[in-house]
Amino acid sequence: MKPYEVMLRLGLALGIGLLLGIERGWRTRTLADGSRVAGVRTFAISGLLGGVAGALGTDDTGLTPGGGLLLAAALVCHTAVIVSFDRSRSRYTRDFSATSTVASLLTFLLGAYAGAGHLQGAAAAAVAAAGILTVRQELHSWLRRISLAELKSAVILLAMTAVVLPWVPDQPVAALGGLNPRHIWLLAIALALVSFLGYVAVKELGERRGLLAAAAAGGLISSTAVLLASARQAARRESPVILLLAASALATAISLGRVFTLVAVLAPTLIRGVLPPLLAAAGVALAFTWWASHPDGEGVAPLRRVARNPFRLLPTCGMALAIGILILVGERLHAAFGNAGTILGALFMGAFDVDAMTISMAKLSVQMPARYAAVAILVGVVGNTLLKIVLALIFGTARFTLGILAVTAGCVAAGALAYGLFAPA
C-alpha cells in the first residue's frame, strides 16, 4: 500500500471521529471539564484507532486472518473502556442513555472501514450518523406526535417496497388476462406513497399548503396517482373539493414539465414543437392552482380533520388493479391500432404512461419528421389528460369530475392555440 493511500485512509478515519465528536461535544458543551466520558478528542482518537487497526489488518486482497484478530481485539478493548466510563457516568448523573456509547463504537468501526479502504461507504455512513444524532430533539418530538395508524401505514409502505416488491413477478400472467403483477404493484406503491405524503403534508403544514406541497412532490412521481388520491379524498369528503382540484392541477403542471425535460434531454430538435403547447397548458394549470388556493378564495377553508389513516391497503390495491385493467385494455387497443399510425399509438400509450410514451416518441423522432414526432408527443399528453377525466368520474364525485373536466379543457385549448400560433412549419 502506497504511503499517500495510507494517509488518505487514516485522514478520513480521523475526520469521521472529528465529525461525530463535534456533534457529541456540542451536546455536552455546558458540562464541566472531566465530567464528560467522550468528547471531540476521544471520538477523534476512536476514529483514528479504528483506522489504524483497519489499515494494519488488510492487504491488497482484503482483511487477513491476523488482521481480523487484531481488529476484534482492538474493538473489544475500545468497547470495554467506553462502557466502563459510561457506566460510571450514568451512576453519577442518573442519565441512562446509550447514545454516546453506541456512537463511539460506530466511530471506531467506521474508522476501521475507512482504514480498510472503503472510503466512500465510510464517509456516507458517518454523515448519515451525524445527521441522525443532530436531529435528536426533532425525532423525539415527532415520535410523541405520531399515531399508531400512521406508524402502521409507514411500516406497510416500507414492506410493500422492500419486502414484497422483489418477489412480485415481472412478466405478464395469463391467468390474470395478461396483466403484469409487478406493474400493478408498483402502481399500488405509487398510490400509497402519494396518499401518505399528502397525509403527512396536511398534518404538518395545514390543509391548503399541505395539499399543494404533497401534490408538487407527487407530481414528480405520478400526476395520475395524485389525481386518484384527490378523487378518493373528494369522495370521502376529507378536504374541500376546490383544494383537491388545485392539487390535481399542480401535479398536472409538474407532469407537463417532466415531459418537456425528457424531450429536451432525449430529442432537443423537438423542443420548438412541444414547448409552446406544454408551456401554455402548464400555465393554465398553474393559474387555476393559484386561483383555487388563493387566500381570498374558497380554498382557504380551515383544516377540519385529517384522514384517520394515511392510506388503506386493500382499497389502494383495488384502485391499482382497476387501473391495471384499464392499462391492459389500452395496450390491446394500441396493439390493434398501432399500425394505423404513430400518432394513434401515442394516444393510447400516453394515456397510461406519459413518460414511456415521451421516451418512445423521442427515440422514433430520428425516423420521422420532427413535426410529426412533436405532434405524437402532444397527442400522448392529451391521452393522459383524458384518462384522468375517466378516473375522476370513476373514483371521485360529480363536482370533482366537472372541475377536472374544466381544467383539462382549458389546458387542451390553450395548448392547441399555442401550437396553432407557434408551431414550426
Image (cartoon, helix red, strand yellow):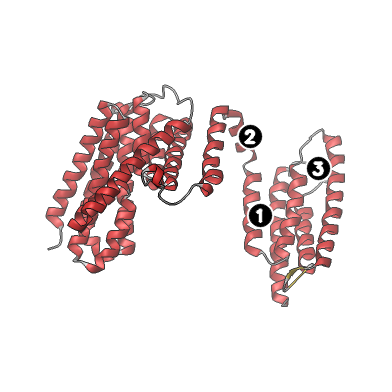
Q: Which quarter of the figure is the C terminus placed in?
A: bottom left
Q: Earlier in the sequence, mark 3 or mark 1?
A: 3
The residue lying toward the viewer, choosing from 185 and 4, is 185
Q: Which of marks 3 and 2 is nearer the N terminus?
A: 3
* Quadrant of the rendered image containing residue 109: bottom right
Question: Compared to 15, does 162 lie above or below?
Answer: above
Query: Can you identify the residue that label 1 sits on?
Result: 126
* Residue on which the image places disc 3: 32
Farthest top residue in view: 304
Q: Along the polypeptide, which appears first: circle 2 or circle 1? A: 1
Read off the residue under disc 2. 140
Q: Give the side of residue 169 with respect to residue 399, left or right.
A: right
Count residues near mark 3 (Cα–Cα under 10 Å), then give few for <14, some for 14-19, many for 20+: few
Instruction: Say few, some or many: other residues with alpha carbon within 10 Å of mark 2 (under 14 / 14 to 19 / 20 or more).
Output: few
**Residue at horizontal 86%, vertical 54%?**
77
Of all residues, the one furthest to the bottom in this rendering is: 2
Q: Distance between the residues labelled 3 and 2?
A: 26 Å
Q: Residue at x 62, y 57 (%)?
A: 124
- Three-letter code, disc 1: Ala
Residue type of the residue flagged with mark 3: Ala
Relative to residue 283, is residue 10 depicted above or below? below
Label 2, secondary structure: give it: helix
Q: Do the residues labelled 3 and 2 touch (CB within 8 Å)?
A: no
Which label number is shown at residue 167?
none
- Per the model, the C-alpha gap separating discs 2 and 1 is 21 Å
Helix, strand, or loop for circle 1? helix
Could you tell me the amino acid type at mark 2? His
What residue do we see at 40% from left, 29% from top?
A: 207
